[in-house]
Amino acid sequence: MAKVHYIMIGGFLGAGKTTGIIKLATHLQTQGKRVGLITNDQSIGLVDTARVKTAGLPVEEITGGCFCCKFNSLVEASDALTKNNAPDVLIAEPVGSCTDLKATVSYPLRKIYGERYRVGPLAVFVDPQRCGRILGVNSQGGNFSEKVVYVYRKQLEEAEIIVINKVDTVTAAGRKELADAVKKAYPKAQVMEVSCTTGEGLEGLFAKLMGGELGREVPMEVDYDTYADGEALLGWLNARVELQGAEFDGNAMLVKVVKVLRDRLAGKGVEIAHLKLTLMPDEGPDMGSLSLTQTNEEPVATHRLKASLSKGILLVNLRAEVDPEVLKREVKEVVAGLEGVSGNVVELAAFRPGRPTPTHRMMNSE
């Protein structure tokens, strides 16, 4: 029996991982390959999972912790996809605030389950604006505190392929300056430049992911106290809201919610890591989705509703460096203040991630 090709695509919150894995999965399907996806979050109600399902892709969702801490759940999810869909390729998207993935996920997967899976190289996506600020290439916009930046840098340090995404949003000069800075800071990694929006560079990236295999170098050193502190500085909120009212424009509603939330948090000096929303009618496959990856940005639509609606389910995934109680209060107040519709928050989880406690941590890949 042929081994399933296992690809993990990491990267910080807002780097474009979900769009990337959907593009990769769709590309592989056009080549006649069967694909399964695994999404991951610290809580329930994932916008990413909704987007993957809307794309018609088989998906399993792991919640309540990252892959490293839920390793057995990761294997179970892989087994479920293998049983139900017999995929040739599994694509896993870890939590955006996680690092040390090779030692805690990739190496154990290859060592313990190597007869089932061929594990590909670890690719890490970066947003050019945020990466540029952290590497000192540009100074526009806000930044995170030192311990959050520690997690970000560790993600890049362990990457075998660093993928500078969204290159269509920067100038040619800015793009070159960032690529040079990444190569200088992380010389062991291959740096690739892509745009999941325009498609630039994607075929080369996909070929690299499908053709390569995970390396065998000794894992990087990680200070788990600093790592835990960095994750804990990020407030997480996942909410499910029932909307009902006279017929309304769902796309305009999404833009309004995102901008009001952004401006309220900006007024408190809060740096947003990622704000994602989806709005779906009660019936039918229609969906609208918006993404905001930084406090000083404008939201970007990843999906647009085709028709107006009078009832719908709004999912809100918000990560920012602030007390989660602040996020909880702001989201509730924004929902309560919506014009033309009534909003009922039926599920809401607001918290700080717990200390990462990996199921395995292997210091070599043999």
Image: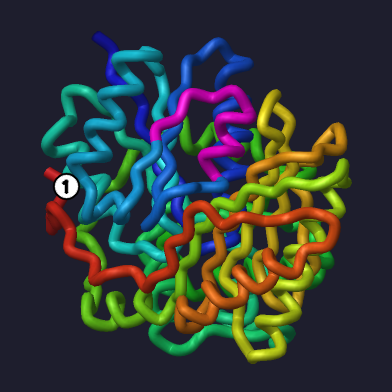
Quadrant of the image occupied by residue 86:
top left
The residue positioned 69% from the left and 41% from the top of the image is: 312
Is the residue marked by circle 1 packed among few (<14), some (14-19), or many (20+) residues within 10 Å? some
Q: Is the N terminus in the top left, top right, bottom left or bottom right quadrant?
A: top left
Please determine whether, in this image, residue 174 is positioned above or below residue 164: below
Q: Which residue is mark 1?
A: 365
Please determine whether, in this image, residue 281 is positioned above or below residue 195: above
Please determine whether, in this image, residue 131 is positioned above or below residue 207: below
Please determine whether, in this image, residue 175 is positioned above or below residue 223: above
In front of the other: 269 or 91: 269
Asked if the stretch drawn in magenta spans residue 56, the answer is: yes
Q: Give how far across and how far down residue 213 sits, in percent.
A: 35, 37
Quadrant of the image occupied by residue 66:
bottom left
In front of the other: 94 or 157: 94
Q: Which residues are magenta?
A: 48-60
Asked if the stretch drawn in magenta spans residue 104, the answer is: no
Q: Visible in this render: residue 234?
A: yes
The residue positioned 13% from the left and 38% from the top of the image is: 111
